[in-house]
Image (cartoon, coloured by chain):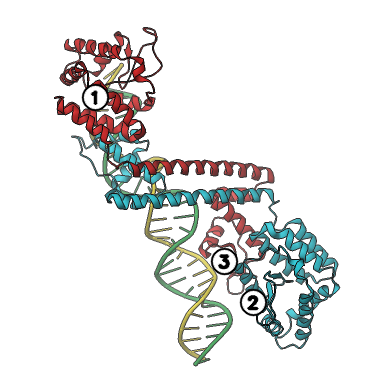
Chain colours: A cyan, B red, C yellow, D green
Amino acid sequence: MLTIGQLAAYAGVTVRTVRHYHAKGLLPEPERDHSGYRRYDALAVAELIKIRTLAEAGVPLARVRELLAAGEEEFAAAVAEIDRRLRAEIRERQRHRERIAQLAAGDSLALPPEAVAYLDRLRDLGVPERMVAAERDSWVLIAAQQPEHMPLYMRIKDRQLDDPVSVRVYHELDAAIDCEPDDPSLVALVDEMVRQLEAISPEEWEGNAEIPDDLAELLDSVFLDSVPAAPRILALLEERGWTGWTKLEPLRAHQPAPHTARVASRSS
Amino acid sequence: MLTIGQLAAYAGVTVRTVRHYHAKGLLPEPERDHSGYRRYDALAVAELIKIRTLAEAGVPLARVRELLAAGEEEFAAAVAEIDRRLRAEIRERQRHRERIAQLAAGDSLALPPEAVAYLDRLRDLGVPERMVAAERDSWVLIAAQQPEHMPLYMRIKDRQLDDPVSVRVYHELDAAIDCEPDDPSLVALVDEMVRQLEAISPEEWEGNAEIPDDLAELLDSVFLDSVPAAPRILALLEERGWTGWTKLEPLRAHQPAPHTARVASRSS
DNA sequence: GCTTGACCCTGACGCAGCGTCAGGGTCCGA
DNA sequence: TCGGACCCTGACGCTGCGTCAGGGTCAAGC
């Protein structure tokens, strides 16, 4: 006959753990000796090891209790389920390894150097600081979610700046931030944007890694919340066959377009 | 500017989580607007994602706080450490997968069929139930720790029973359980045992998977605790050049022996 | 102007799976 | 008979949030 300490030692757990399992009804309370000590037989060791095997595999104790009482069939199904979970957890850790490796590799700043250079160039081109800050915030969000795509995005944006017309759009957008939704100058602004969009050749967008829809949605909502004229701008764009903002794309009905989405100049 | 809900959505966490990080000092409390709502900038998103990346990799929040304040060097060292832990956890899950697979494969009884058959044969040979029960308990412990070695152990034990002398030892051991330590019949018993041990050819033990030392130690201590004459028996065995009980082996000085340990007939 | 629903606020308790006292009693060897 | 290693119960502590409770706020629609 074993004491609780011996039982625990056999199974490689602490005495506290054994008592916890009694309290939770996982392991039946054994007989007591004349002075109230618990006394176990060898079968208790087998039971305890079985419980630990499940618990260490991450099965919640409440579930372990169910499984101990379950039939062979349910048990086998549960084991299959546990195995699935373990495999999923392994894959998860592997992803986490990659993620923290990226964390260490990046200088752990909010923006990669290309993005900083791009924002500096905006300032040099006379784009108002308010617009630059808005751009920065958007790119911070994108960089946080997709650091690996930033170099591509920045190459695209940088080339956009080679066209003086796009720079003018920034200034107009800046002015538009304070516009009432019915301001007539918005029409001219949107016309300009559309002209630019249509000038982009599909080849230029080859390999454009798409911004995920949910991210685009969030960025759009920031734009909508912070710029009073935003709904009007989007409406005018739709009239001209373009939908969305972060991820501007041609309306299908209007003009059959390449499948790739387009990264627009952004502001929030 | 973002509300707490938007911030949480960007980073893929709950609002509660963000507040928790404020309370724990992981994320600085931002400005409040006129009605007391928290207002965040985009940099907070980057910070929050960094925190989540670490937390999801299993870093305790208190440690995350340290790392956020740490220099590049310490951070890199910590990341290496985290990576080691993740790899260890992956290996751990792989072991757990094997363990639960065994759990499902075994009929989840305390003893495999070979062991049950062996115990039944003991009964058939007239070994007293008390001895059979003691044997069973020992094998339950061994089976719990080393299910994969049970077939081998049982083959060995089964062959032992082919020799009528070993059966007699069981009866004598049964009598010995109640003996006082100075009972003279113990001497004859031990002599018999030694004769048997020396009759075992080394080849018979080829591939004998060793019982781990700690398990043997525990089994020995059960024997010592439950049989008053145990210390005397062990002493007599040592006089004759054998040490241990669960894992009986020749004393080196006395007789240079094969390296393989020997599984003795056991009782507790 | 009023309601409705979706937000926001603080504070506090709940959960798993034990670790860790606290404040006792027990057992065993020297 | 003493000391140290066990055993007992009961209760609080820890992490990382989930989940009320009991409020205020804001925008939209009627």
For the residue marked with disc 3, what is the amino acid?
Answer: Ala
Disc 2, SS = helix
* Disc 2 from disc 1: Cα separation: 79 Å
x and y, in percent, of residue A65 in the image: 31, 50
Residue C15 left/right relative to A221: left
x and y, in percent, of residue A17 in the image: 35, 42
- Quarter holding the C terminus of chain B? top left
For the residue marked with disc 1, what is the amino acid?
Answer: Ser
Farthest-out residue, top: B254
Can residue A2 be seen here? The reply is: no
In contact (CB < 8 Å): disc 1 and disc 3: no
x and y, in percent, of residue A46 in the image: 30, 38
- Quarter holding the N terminus of chain B? bottom right
Residue B171 left/right relative to A191: left
Disc 1, SS = loop
Which one is earlier in the sequence, the residue at label 1 or at label 3?
3
Task: Please tell me which residue is depicted at 76% across the width and 79% down the height of the picture.
Answer: A194
